[in-house]
Image (spheres, grey):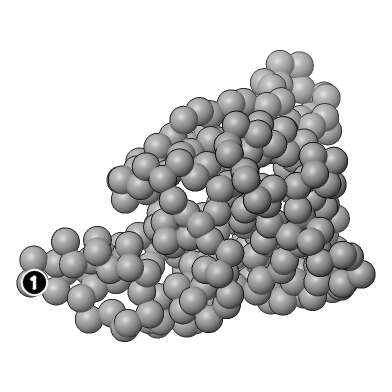
C-alpha cells in the first residue's frame, strides 16, 4: 500500500499482517471517536508528572509560565493532571501545549479547555511530528523554546512507522537540523540518508527546544533511544529508570514469570 511520507516523498508502507496502525492518524481518530481507547497507555503516568515538576522546580521561571510540549497526548488525563499541579504551584497552565496528529483528540481536548480561564487553558495543536511541513504550518514554534518535552509512549507509537529517506533532491519542507545532516553526508554524490522515526522526531524537536531542555519519556522498550547517532548528537541520555508494570500485565498462572518493567527516560538537549 502506498502512502505519502511526512518528508513529502512517496514510500511503500510495509504492513505487518494484523499489526495496529499506530502511525496512522485515522486509526486513532476512530478509536477516540468511538470510545475504544481509554487514554492511558502503559500506566497513568504519575511518575512522569513527578519528573516534570522536579525538573521545572529547579529552573528559573520568572514569568511563572513553564513551557511544556506534550507529545501525542490523545485522550489521556496526563496533561490535565499536570496543569492541575501547575495551578497548585501558582504557574500558568497555558504554558502546556498538547500536540497530536489525531484531529479527534485535538477536537476533544479543545472542547474540554474551552470553558477555562485563558491563563489556565492548555493549548491543543494538530500536527504530525514526523512532518516538518506539518509542524511549520501550525503555531507550535510560537510557544518555543520549550523547557520540557513530555512523552508518554508516543515515541513507542512513532517507532512503528517506516524510516524516512532524505537526499539532496528532497523537497524544501525539511527541518533545518535534518537538512544540515543531509548536506554533511551527501558529498555531492546524491546518497540518500535514512532516519528512523524516533531519530527523526528527535531532530524535529531540536528547533523547538534549547540547550538544557529536558525530554522525559515513558516507554515499554529497554532500548528506545539507543543506537541512534543523529539523536545522540543533540540529546544526551541522562537516565533510564525501570518501573514495575501495572498488575495484570503478567500471567499469574506462570510459576516463574519475570517482573515486567516500563522505563522512564530522561534526555537533555545538548
Name the quadrant of the C terminus: top left
Quarter residue 35 falls in: bottom right
Is residue 74 visible in this depiction of the protein?
no
Between 164 and 256, the one nearer to me in the picture: 164
Please name the residue shown 79% across and 75% down the image: 107
The one nearer the camera, 108 or 113, is 113
Q: Residue furthest right?
A: 115
Residue pointed to by mark 1: 189
Residue at 49 percent across and 67 percent down: it is 130
Q: Is residue 214 left or right of residue 250?
A: left
Local crowd size for mark 1, using a 10 Å CA cut-off: few (<14), some (14–19), many (≥20): few
* Towards the viewer: 101 or 17: 101
Considering the numbered disc 1 on the image, is that residue within a helix, a strand or a loop? Answer: loop
Q: Is residue 72 above or below residue 1?
A: above
* Residue at 45% across, 73% down: 132
Q: Quadrant of residue 247?
A: top right
Q: Residue furthest top?
A: 256
Q: Residue furthest front?
A: 62
x then y, percent, for residue 119: 79, 61
Res 166 → quadrant: bottom left
Q: Judge whether residue 53 can be spotted in this image.
A: yes
Q: Position of residue 239 (x, y in %)?
A: 50, 28
Question: Is 227 left, or right, of 62 in this rendering?
Answer: left
**Which percent across, then down, holds residue 225?**
45, 42
Q: How many marks?
A: 1
Where is residue 101? Give x, y as percent.
64, 71
**Residue 67 shown left or right of residue 82 in the figure:** left
Amino acid at each position: 500500500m502506498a502512502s505519502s511520507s511526512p518528508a513529502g516523498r512517496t514510500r511503500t508502507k510495509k504492513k505487518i499482517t494484523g499489526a495496529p496502525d499506530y502511525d496512522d492518524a485515522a486509526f486513532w481518530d476512530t478509536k477516540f471517536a468511538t470510545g475504544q481507547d481509554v487514554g492511558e497507555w502503559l500506566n497513568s503516568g504519575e511518575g512522569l508528572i513527578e519528573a516534570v515538576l522536579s525538573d521545572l522546580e529547579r529552573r528559573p521561571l520568572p514569568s511563572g509560565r513553564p513551557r511544556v510540549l506534550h507529545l501525542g497526548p490523545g485522550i489521556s488525563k496526563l496533561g490535565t493532571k499536570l496543569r492541575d499541579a501547575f495551578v497548585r504551584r501558582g504557574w500558568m497552565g497555558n504554558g502546556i501545549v498538547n500536540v497530536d496528529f489525531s484531529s479527534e483528540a485535538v477536537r476533544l481536548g479543545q472542547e474540554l479547555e474551552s470553558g477555562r480561564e485563558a491563563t489556565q487553558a492548555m493549548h491543543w495543536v494538530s500536527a504530525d511530528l514526523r512532518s516538518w511541513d506539518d509542524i511549520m504550518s501550525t503555531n507550535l514554534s510560537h510557544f518555543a523554546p520549550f523547557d520540557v518535552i513530555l512523552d508518554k509512549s508516543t515515541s513507542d507509537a512513532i517507532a512503528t512507522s517506516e524510516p524516512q529517506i532524505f537526499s539532496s533532491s528532497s523537497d524544501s519542507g525539511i527541518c533545518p537540523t535534518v537538512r544540515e545532516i543531509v548536506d554533511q553526508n551527501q558529498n555531492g554524490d546524491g546518497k540518500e540518508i535514512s532516519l528512523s522515526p524516533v531519530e527523526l522526531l528527535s531532530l524535529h524537536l531540536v528547533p523547538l527546544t534549547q540547550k538544557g531542555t529536558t525530554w522525559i519519556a515513558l516507554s515499554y522498550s529497554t532500548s528506545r533511544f539507543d543506537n541512534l547517532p543523529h539523536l545522540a548528537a543533540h540529546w544526551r541520555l541522562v537516565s533510564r529508570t525501570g518501573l514495575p508494570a501495572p498488575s495484570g500485565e503478567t500471567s499469574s498462572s506462570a510459576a516463574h514469570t519475570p517482573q515486567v518493567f516500563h522505563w522512564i527516560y530522561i534526555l537533555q538537549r545538548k
